[in-house]
Image (cartoon, rainbow, N blue to C red):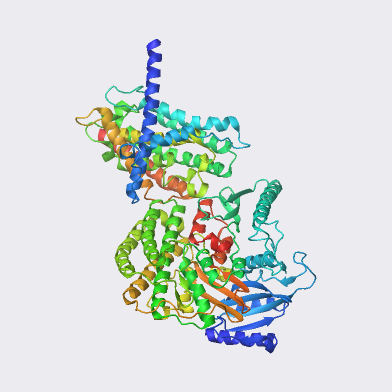
Amino acid sequence: MSITVERNMKQWLLDTIKPDEFAEKDLKKNGILFEALARPDQIQSVAREFLAQRYFLESLTAVDFAECLELVYHFNRWDGCRRVCVKVLVPKEGGVPGNGAWHAPTLSSIFKSANWFEREIHEMFGIVFDGHPHLKRLLLPESSTIFPLLKSFKGEPKGSDVAQSLKLIEEDAKEFRVQEAQSLTKKDKDYYLNLGPQHPSTHGVLRVLLHLSGERVLDGEPIIGYSHRHHEKMMEIQTYFGCWPNMGRLDYVGAMSYNMGYALLAEKALGLVPPPRVEHIRVLMTELNRISSHLLWMGTFLLDLGAFTPFFYCFDDREQILDILEMATGERLTYDYFRFGGVDHDIPQEFAPAIKAFIPGFRKRLADYDKLIRRNIIFEKRTKGLGVLTKESALSYGVTGPSLRAAGVAYDLRRDEPYSLYPELDFNIPTATDSDVYSRYWVRFREMEESLKIISQLVDKIPAGETKLARVPKNFPKGEYYSACESARGLFGMHLVSDGSLNPYRFKLRTPSFSNLNSIIDMLPGCLISDVVAVLGSIDIVLPEIDR
Amino acid sequence: MIPELFTIILYGTLVILFVSVNALFLVWMERRVSARIQLRRGPIHVGWQGLLQTVADAVKLISKELVLPSESDRFLYILAPMLVFAPLLAAFLILPLGPGMVMRDLNVGFLFAFALTNITFIGIFIAGWSSNSKYALLGAMRAVAQNISYEIPLLLSTMGVVLLAQSLKMSELVAAQNSVWFIFLQPVAFLIFLCSSLAEANRAPFDIPEAESELVAGFHTEYSGMRFALFFLGEYTAIFISSAIAATLFLGGWEGPFLPGAVWLLIKTYAIVLVVMWIRWTFPRLRSDQLMSFAWKVLIPFAIVNVFITAVVLELQKI
């Protein structure tokens, strides 16, 4: 059925746009099925058609070329890899960025996820999206005037940069106070609460602006950007090899998946085939890391619900995993271990026995968690029926990962866009149907069991052999590449534009929590403050990955 | 006149001394109990088994700066911690430590203690209001709503005991349990009492006024140093008082073989405190609306039925 949809979509696109602006691509190499170039006035109807065919907007970004700016839309479907790329050219006429001369139509009324994507492009490239309801800066301070992802942008010397941004943040705070005061005088019964950026339950520096009536939330908006470090710009001025450490510092809780993503991108683009030993090590590492990430989530989530004790048990288990990972990588958190076509160094002798010793103990612990947590009546009362995200809403926001699977969609890239050893492995994709906080807990919990299953399948069968390729190119051939993998939080996509030189021309990181957090806007209304914390905990966000 | 004044001062000093030592001990105990539950070791380095750790913490708190938030209501802000702490001291008046060993054996008995412990909620509300902080205000709102709801089942649950003993006097309540402890005659009342006193003392799973994962620290968010310590002292003293009253009403108070009465009362009280801590470190927190419906839809009906059945059974026995 999905193939029919794909064929129909292709035909529809061919009918709509000129045939010479349509190109078939290689899914194995470029990560997309085909690419189409649409006119700015066409993109809205194209997006509507994609939505009607139940595609979601996976990623939206822009690339700055000398003569024009290019908007890159990636659409994908939940039933396998149907990734399609649509591009729109925005001519660079009418002078400098910031004066509002560069225009493009907005998709925010069609895809809710486009709202934040477009705001990010607006602040980074200076493109104005006509009809966008809330076109403010997203990651940078609101009053800043720079457009960092334009090629014409040159970073200032370091000292003044820091001083400048501090000044900007200070001005922002002042402006916010004025704003708040104005809104308070307007409707003096309304009560605004800033949950964060310094708050115990926002898991980093996130601010959620809540509009309250008593304790009941009328609406809320996450405000992000407090840990923005601009990985994308950083990677533009580094070599391809130099980008590896960035991969460990995006999602520091589940960094192995990000290593995996970058390795996949390079291997697809360069046509490298890693040795079997490498594949085994990589999958073992990624799954161990997935368990440790879910454990950290479970502990902090229950801490948000007010239960202290599970936190320590989770950390006790996580510590054992970190010890195993440290044994092989030398790192405990921000892993920088994978390499193009290999891994940095071989695993030690005691690696496999350590995993084997860990598995039975952890199985027993999982049973304990189930008794302590899921069958607790207070836990059930606090989480069932709370923070429901409908399938349509999830589609519109481009939610992926366990949060999506809790809504009954069995979309997992390990199965739907198979990579590495996953096609040969036996594992299930846990789903739930209610799409509430409880389901999200239950899906993640069972994912740990599945990961453990994968690990126990592989741990005895690590083949001997090389862990590195002899020759690896230093640069990517000219072209565009997209690659995605399943991180602990959802779909992690990377869009690379290479001009053939030693540095990436443009590197877009599509991080799962970014879209997942955006969807919280639909879940908050009607919650109590206690529920806000539970809902926020249930979608499992890692802020540095959102802010990048 | 002079001896009267002397006893007041003596009792006051003794109570304050006991309250401070007791709070230090309870904090230590809480840490050790939670550590035992959570695969940790807790404080073990300062003093024997870490007993002096809390003393060191108290010294630290005393030496901290007292921060006054800008635009706070100065007078009320300073008044609130005292208002929370002081009434709890007076509640010690009615605790019977042994035969004849009670400072004032009042006719209204434990009602007096409840009346006093309730004043603390006025203090908590003042603290939340005067801090000029949104989290503190929300915490104070929750505290007041919670207190009003849980006062009713708390008192209703004790009525069964009062019917059995035919008195509110603490000494007579203990004497009435000579043959059998009331916990065996009134198990439902004991459970309701325990739940309600957890809520009264803001303990998990009913600790919503200071729910740290939601409201940062609730009503005492803006307090520092010794003012914060007074809230802390108040909380632990409240736990002790409600546990001691529970021990007196349901577990036979100071009665027990061999050891002196005061020791027995302490043993029973700390046993209840241990249960309270155990509960805290096991359960997640309830939500504020669930907390209210639990009081009004579960505890209060059960408490009323319990009083009714007790009264009927007593009347039937007379016939």
Where is residue A482 drawn, in percent x and y? Answer: 56, 77
Relative image position of residue B208 (x, y in whole percent) = 47, 45
In the drawing, does residue A99 fall left or right of residue A301?
A: right
From where the camera sits, is residue A288 visible?
yes
Instruction: Classify B134 as above or below A14.
Output: above
Give the tally of numbered discs: 0
To which quarter of the image does residue B265 belong? top left
Would you say A95 lies left or right of A83 here? right
Could you say where residue A425 lies in the image, as x and y percent from the top left?
Answer: 38, 78
The C terminus of chain B lies in which quarter of the figure? top left
Residue name at image x 26 percent, y 24 percent: B99
Q: Is residue B191 visible?
A: no
**Vertical position of residue A270 compared to residue B193: above or below:** below
Question: What residue lies at 57% left-to-right and 38% top-to-bottom?
Answer: B131
Front-most of A493 and B137? A493
Query: Residue A345: which quarter of the image?
Result: bottom left
In the depicted structure, whether residue A425 falls above or below residue B289:
below
> Where does the N terminus of chain B fall, quadrant-wise?
top left
Q: Residue furthest top?
A: B1
Residue shown at the point (46%, 65%) measured from the top left = A335
Q: Position of residue A58 (x, y in %)?
A: 58, 73
Q: Residue furthest front?
A: A470
**Residue closest to the eye, A33 or A504:** A504
